[in-house]
Amino acid sequence: MSGAMQDWTMRVTAVLDHAAREAGQREIVTRWADGSETRTNWIGIRRDALKMAQALIALGVKEGDRVASLAMNHSRHLVSWYGVAGMGGVLHTINPRLFDDQLEYIANHAEDRVLIYDAAFQSIVDRMKPLWPSIEHYICFDNGEFEAWIGQQDGDFEWVEGSERDPCMLCYTSGTTGNPKGVLYEHRSTVLHAIAGLQPSAFNFSPSSVMLPVVPMFHAASWGLPYSGAMAGIKFVFSAVNDPAILDELMKREGVTDSAGVPTVWLAHFQYCDAQGIDLPALKAATIGGSAAPKFMIERLMKNGTRVQHAWGMTETSPIGTVGGPTWDWEHLSFDEKVAKTAMQGRPVFGVELRIVDLDDMSTALPRNGTTSGALQIRGPWVIKRYFKAEQDATTADGWFDTGDVAIIHPDGTLQLTDRTKDVIKSGGEWISSVELENAAVGHPSVAEAACIGMYHPKWDERPVLFVVKKEGAALSASDVIDHLKPLIAKWWLPDAIEFVDDIPHTATGKISKKDLRERFSDYRLAE
Ligand code: AMP
C-alpha cells in the first residue's frame, strides 16, 4: 500500500516563490563596494531571478550547465542563486581567494560556460581568461552591466521543472592535499538543509529577524542562510565589502539582529569597536563556525547579550552538521559553564547522524561518553555521497562520510572537536590534540595566533611544537607560554618547544595551513 499525499517537488525555486508570496515586502539591502546602497525585496529578487533565467537561456545555457559566480555578498548574487537554478542550471560559486592554479583547475573541471563577477575581481578575470577556455560569456555584476543584461527580458517565465534530485549548486573544497574537489548540491538536499537551519536549535529565525551574513556566498552556500532566510521571510542586509567599520555601521543602522561568520570576522569586529571606543552591535544571535570559536570570543558576545550559535560543518555537509545554543539544562549552568559548553561545537540538527570510530581501526564505533575521541563520521540527506565527476563514492561501505575531524561526543549529544586526523599528534602511542594546545595558547593576552604541529621524536615518535605569533609590541618568552599552559593541559601535552614566528600560513579560506607550516619547517629537528 502506498500513502495518499500529494506529490510536491522540492526545488529551491519553491523557496523563493514562498518568500515572494508570503514575505514579499521584506527588504533586501545591499551596501556595494563603491559605497552606494540599494534596496529591493523578495518580490524584486524573484522578478530579477525570472529575468536572469530567461537571459541565460537566451545565451544558449542548457539544463545542467554550470554558470560560475566570482562575487561577494549582494542582492545580485542572491538573484543568481535562484536565477541559475530556476532555468535548470548549476551555479558554481568560486572563491576569489583561491590561488591561480586552483582557479584554473576548478573552472576547467566544472566546465563553466558563463562567469558572472564583481568588478572588484576584474584583475582575476583578465589574468585567468586565457586559462579558462570553457567560459564563453563574461558578465559583470557592477557598472549597470548585470541590470542591462537581464533588463532585456520581460520576466514572463515559468521555472524549469525537473527532478528534486537535479543539481543546483557546485562548490569546491580545497582540502589539504591534491586538487580541489567539487561538491554538487541537489535541489532536494538544499531544501532539506535549509529547513534544518530553521530548527529553533539552529539559526532560530523569526519573521522579525534581520540577518547580515558575513560568511561569503561563495563558501559552502553561505551556510544555507539565503535559503533558510527566504523560508522564514527575513530581511537581509548584505555588504559587498568585509570591512568591520562598514559592517558595524550597517548592523547598527539597519537593526541587524543576526549575523554569521568565521571567528576572524568577529575578532576584527572586536578590534574595530575597541579602537573606536564604541559598543559592539546589539545582536540577538551570532553564528560562528568554520573553525573553533575561542572562549574569550564567546564570553564577550554572551556578555553583550548575544546568543552564540557555535556551528560545525563542512562544504561536504552543505554545511550544517551541528549547531550550539542554549541546551535544556541552560538555566542550571553558571556563566563559565555556559561559555565552556558553547566552546564545544553544538548538537546535530535533525537530519544528520554522527558517530566516532577508532582512529586506527575505523570499523570500531566508539562510545559517546564525553572522554573517548575518534574519527568523526556523518550521514544524512545533505551529506556528500560522491565528489563531482569522481568515479568512486566518498563514503564508507556502510554509507558514512569520514570528515577527517577528530572529536569527542558527549552523552547529551554535544560534539567536541579535538583535531583533524592529519594534525593530531601521536606521542608514545597516546593522542595529543593540537587544537586544544592552540586554544589554550591563544588565551594568553600576548599571543596573537598559535599553531601546533607534531615533530619527529626518536623516543616518542612525535612531540608537539608550538609556533606563536606575539601581539604587536608584546614581550613574551617561551617559559611565559609554558607557565600559561601548565594549569590548562596535561603535563605530558606540554610542547617540547615554543618557536616565535612573524606569521603563520593560512589557506585561501583563512584557516591555519599546517601543511604549509610543516613545509616551512621541514628541516626542523627537536633537540633530544
Ligand atoms: P570547509 O569545508 O572549508 O568549511 O572546512 C570544514 C572543516 O572546518 C571541518 O572539517 C572542520 O575541521 C573545520 N570546522 C568547521 N567548523 C568548525 C568549528 N566550529 N570548530 C572547529 N573546526 C571547525
Image (cartoon, rainbow, N blue to C red):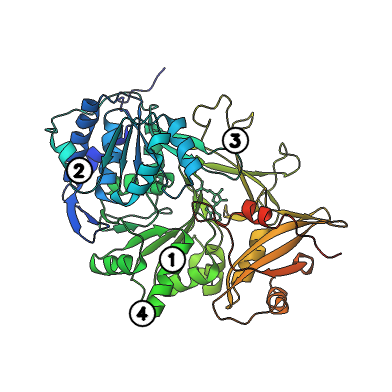
Q: Which of marks 3 and 2 is nearer the N terminus?
A: 2
Mark 1 to mark 2: distance in Å?
34 Å
- Which amino acid type is shown beneath numbered disc 2? Glu
Question: Pointer 1: what residue?
Answer: 266
Query: Dot 2 lies on which element?
Result: helix
Placement of the N terminus among the 4 image quadrants: top left
Residue 517 image position (x, y, % from top left): 64, 56
Figure quadrant of residue 358: top right
Q: Earlier in the sequence, mark 1 or mark 4?
A: 1
Asked whether the beta carbons under mark 4 and mark 3 sit within 8 Å of each other, the answer is no
Query: Dot 4 lies on which element?
Result: helix
- 52 with respect to 192 (left or right): left
- 330 with respect to 464 (left or right): left
Question: Pointer 4: what residue?
Answer: 276
Mark 2 to mark 4: distance in Å?
38 Å
- Which amino acid type is shown beneath numbered disc 1? Trp
Packing grade of label 3 (10 A; few <14, some 14-19, many >=20) is many
Mark 1 to mark 3: distance in Å?
33 Å
